[in-house]
Each structure stands twice: as C-alpha cells, then as structure tokens.
Image (cartoon, rainbow, N blue to C red):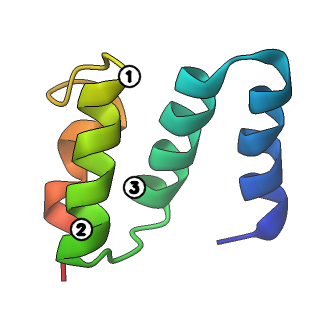
C-alpha cells in the first residue's frame, strides 16, 4: 500500500477523528486486497468494537475475507 494513503488516513487522528482514520485505513486495506493474519484480524475486530463501530458495515465486513 502506498505510504501516502496511510499517512492521509492517519492525518485524521490529529483532528480527533480516530474512528474516521481507522475506517479509511481499513477501506484502503480492503481496496488494495491486502492479506492480514488472524492476529491482525482479531486486533482489528477488538478495536472496531471498542470504538463503537459496526463490524457488519463499511470496509469492516470485508476484513474476514482478507485473512490468510
């Protein structure tokens, strides 16, 4: 994944938009079809639930299909 895409997603953290930042980062991971490990998937799920996002919506619903 292009480091500029990652940085643009992380830039939202500076504006207290952590949820949006994580949503965008997950969206980029899905769009780039990047494989993730079981551990990475489990960490993402915990973070999604912890910040109150819906695992069945947006890019989050596609993360399971990226597990290698």
Q: Looking at the image, do the residues carrying marks 1 and 3 touch, with CB atoms under 8 Å apart? A: no
Sequence-wise, the earlier of marks 1 and 2 is 1
Per the image, the residue denoted by label 3 is 30
Q: In which quarter of the image is residue 65?
A: bottom left
Q: Which residue is drawn at 14% across and 57% down?
A: 64
Sequence-wise, the earlier of marks 1 and 3 is 3
Total count of labels:
3
Per the image, the residue denoted by label 1 is 51
Query: Percent position (x, y) of residue 12?
Result: 77, 28
Q: Quadrant of residue 42?
A: bottom left
Q: Which residue is drawn at 30% across and 27% down?
A: 50
Query: Percent position (x, y) of residue 16?
Result: 74, 16
Q: Looking at the image, do the residues carrying marks 2 and 3 touch, with CB atoms under 8 Å apart? A: yes
Where's the C terminus, which quadrant? bottom left
Q: Looking at the image, do the residues carrying marks 1 and 2 touch, with CB atoms under 8 Å apart? A: no
User: Considering only vertical position in the picture, is 44 above or below 36?
Assistant: above
């Amino acid at each position: 994944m292009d480091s500029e895409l990652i940085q643009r997603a992380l830039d939202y953290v500076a504006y207290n938009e952590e949820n949006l930042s994580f949503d965008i980062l997950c969206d980029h991971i899905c769009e780039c079809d990047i494989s993730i490990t079981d551990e990475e998937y489990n960490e993402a799920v915990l973070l999604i639930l912890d910040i109150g996002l819906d695992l069945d919506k947006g890019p989050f619903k596609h993360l399971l299909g990226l597990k290698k």
